[in-house]
Amino acid sequence: MTPTEPAVQRPLAWDGIPDGGWQPIEVQSMDATTRPLLAPAQSPAPRGGQAKPIPRDYRSFAGVGVALLLGLTGCPPAVVEQRVPAVPYVLTVPLKPAQGSVLRLSGTVRARYETPIAFQVPGRILERKVDAGQRVVQGAPLFKLDPRDFDEAIRAAQAQLGSAEAAYATAKSEHARQRRLMAENATSQERLDRAALAERDAQNAVEAAKASLARALINRSYTELVAPDSGIILEVLAEPGQVVAAGSPVVILARNGEREIEVELPDSSNPPSGGRVILPDRTSLTVELREIAGSADPRSRTWRARYRIRQGQENGQRLLPLALGEVVAVELDRNSAAELGDGALYEVPLSAVDERGSGPRVWLVEDGRAKPVPVTMVGITPQTARIRVDLPPSTRVIAVGTHLLTEGQAVQEKR
């Protein structure tokens, strides 16, 4: 270093010396061309002598050691990343009380009186004179049985009546003869009494024979089945050649007159007392409950109910005729508290109702956890569901994705 050059403060490092000592060395600043790692160092001078330079090979080893030491002390420990499951967001909506609740169902137009008609005598069907859907008037022929057996029964009854009448004439003549003999004291009182008794028995036999003949004639008339009233044939249940028993229905007749709407209610505890029938032209007819079945259908578990269509004019419009068997839309009013049953009636989005085999339910968010609450279904529309549940108004329920929830699952509420 010359006197004109300023002194440069250089960092020190330690280099290993093979003869067992350590000596601080100067670490040269590195540039892009040379980048020397360590400056030359001098080994300790022996006694009475001059210090000798450290060999270059040892200086290289020392540089590598210093680099490793700096690397080990400067690298932070590795951090293992753990994936924490994200808590899903759920959209909630408030329960809205259903104002003017309406139960919408499909109903079938039925006649007030649908009579199964049967023969009153057994026999083989000879003719069928009507088809299903045919209109008939009172007294119109429907079916006819083979009358040969009944004609024979009439002839037998007539023969029995002739025999009884002959026996009665003989007994009557004998009684008259005994009376004449008794007047002449030519017979006994006992014979007179026997003749009188025989006459009465013969007279009774005649009456019985007449009744048998009348019954045979009536049975013969039963071989032709006629319509008891005007109406429409709903169904034909027998065919020519078939042998039917007495009282076995062969045709069902819907009588003219009052029409009703038959619906299947989901619950019979509080059936709606009235409502409306929506006709294809968007007009409506008022209906009122007439009867409801005493037990549920064993297959559908629903209750059959009949609603009477009020006759006459309503709102200045004439009652429109309805075809039997026609399917119509029915709106039944469930406004009264008695018809609502236990719990309040609410309207929620259809997707808020979850049903996975354990009954319908909705989901609440309590303390960040999903909680199911059972509900009773009252009715549905394409977008909403009407439910009955014992919850206060404005309670928030999960609106979508309920089929993916499990009880106690952590969720984040989004309003």
Image (tube, helix red, strand yellow):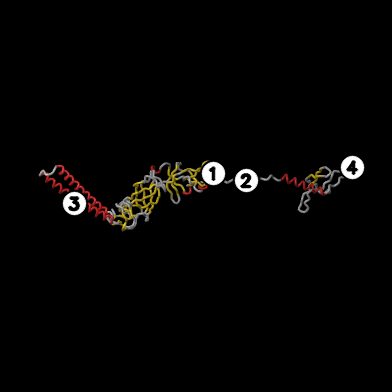
The numbered disc on residue 287 is none
Residue that label 1 marks: 409
The answer to which of marks 4 and 3 sits earlier in the sequence is: 4
Q: Secondary structure at mark 4?
A: loop
**Residue farthest to the front, as pictured:** 186
Category of crowding for the residue at label 1, using alpha-carbon neighbours closer than 10 angstroms: few (below 14), some (14–19), many (at least 20): few
User: In the rendered view, does 186 fall on the left or right side of 396?
Assistant: left
- Write the residue at 13% across / 46% down: 178
The answer to which of marks 1 and 4 sits earlier in the sequence is: 4
Residue type at mark 1?
Answer: Gln
- Distance of label 1 from label 2 (alpha carbons): 21 Å
Residue that label 2 marks: 82
- Distance of label 1 from label 3 (alpha carbons): 102 Å
- Distance of label 1 from label 4 (alpha carbons): 86 Å
Q: Are marks 2 and 3 in contact (CB under 8 Å)?
A: no
The answer to which of marks 2 and 3 sits earlier in the sequence is: 2
The numbered disc on residue 166 is 3
Residue 64 visible to an observer of this rendering: yes
Residue that label 4 marks: 48
Residue type at mark 3?
Answer: Ala
Category of crowding for the residue at label 3, using alpha-carbon neighbours closer than 10 angstroms: few (below 14), some (14–19), many (at least 20): some
User: In the rendered view, does 401 fall on the left or right side of 296?
Assistant: right
- Distance of label 4 from label 3 (alpha carbons): 184 Å
Residue 389 percent coordinates (x, y): 45, 43
Q: Are marks 1 and 2 in contact (CB under 8 Å)?
A: no
